[in-house]
Amino acid sequence: MIESKKLRSAGDFPNKSVVEYATVRVEIPHRLVPSNLRNPHYRDEDIVAGLYASPTGRLSYKTLYLDSIELAERFAEYLHQTFQSRPYANEYALKVEVITTTQKVTATRGKAKHSAAVAETLLGKAP
């Protein structure tokens, strides 16, 4: 098991409302975005950068909150394998980012919930 360093939580910063989280952002051309996520204001060639993967690997506009960079990187590797069978297999980019927010409650709850779900996905689907 990889030793993962937890990102800073509420109270670890001078401002007690600040929380840090890791996320995996997905960028794909709008023409390849699943129909339920399409936006009529985009052109087909526009790159949609506000997408995230859900803990099960589906595309979503909802932010993914993870408690460590290592977990985000392992999830990105899993997504690379998962995306090979999708229409956008050769036309996507994954970006692992660490973000600081003052949405303390949302990010703290999201980190606990999403990190557990992603860890479960990685354990259950490991090759």
Image (cartoon, rainbow, N blue to C red):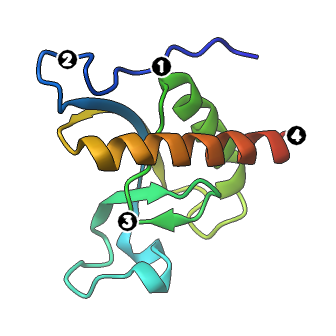
Q: How crowded is mark 1: few (under 14 residues within 10 Å), some or many (20 or more)?
A: some
**Quadrant where the N terminus is found in the figure:** top right
Q: Name the residue under label 4.
A: 127
Residue 39: quarter of image: bottom left
Residue depth check, mark 3 versus mark 4: number of the one nearer the observer? 3
- Circle 1 SS class: loop
Q: Along the polypeptide, which appears first: circle 4 or circle 2?
A: 2
Q: Which residue is drawn at 25% across and 79% down?
A: 43
How far apart are the alpha carbons under marks 2 and 3?
28 Å
- Where is residue 68 drawn, in percent x and y? 49, 26
Label 3: state its secondary structure. Answer: loop
Question: Which mark sits nearer the N-terminus, 1 or 4?
Answer: 1
Point out the tag, 3 or 4, that comes first from the N-terminus.
3
Q: Is residue 81 left or right of residue 35?
A: right
The Cα–Cα distance between marks 3 and 4, rounded to whole angstroms, is 28 Å
Question: Where is residue 33 shown, x and y percent of the image?
Answer: 45, 73
Distance of mark 1 from mark 4, alpha carbons? 25 Å
* CB atoms of marks 3 and 4 within 8 Å: no
Q: Residue 61 carries which label?
A: 3
Q: In the image, is residue 30 above or below residue 120?
A: below
As drawn, the label of residue 13 is 2
- Residue 79 image point, x, y percent: 63, 48
> For the residue labelled by badge 4, is the local secondary structure a helix, a strand or a loop?
loop
Q: Earlier in the sequence, mark 3 or mark 1?
A: 1
Kind of residue at badge 3: Tyr
Please tell me whether mark 1 or mark 4 is closer to you in this view: 1
Which amino acid does the dot numbered 4 rest on?
Pro
Quarter of the view holding residue 96: top left
Label 4 close to label 2 by CB (< 8 Å): no
Circle 1 residue = 6
Residue 26 spot, x, y in % from top left: 43, 52
Q: Of tags 3 and 1, which is closer to the observer? A: 1
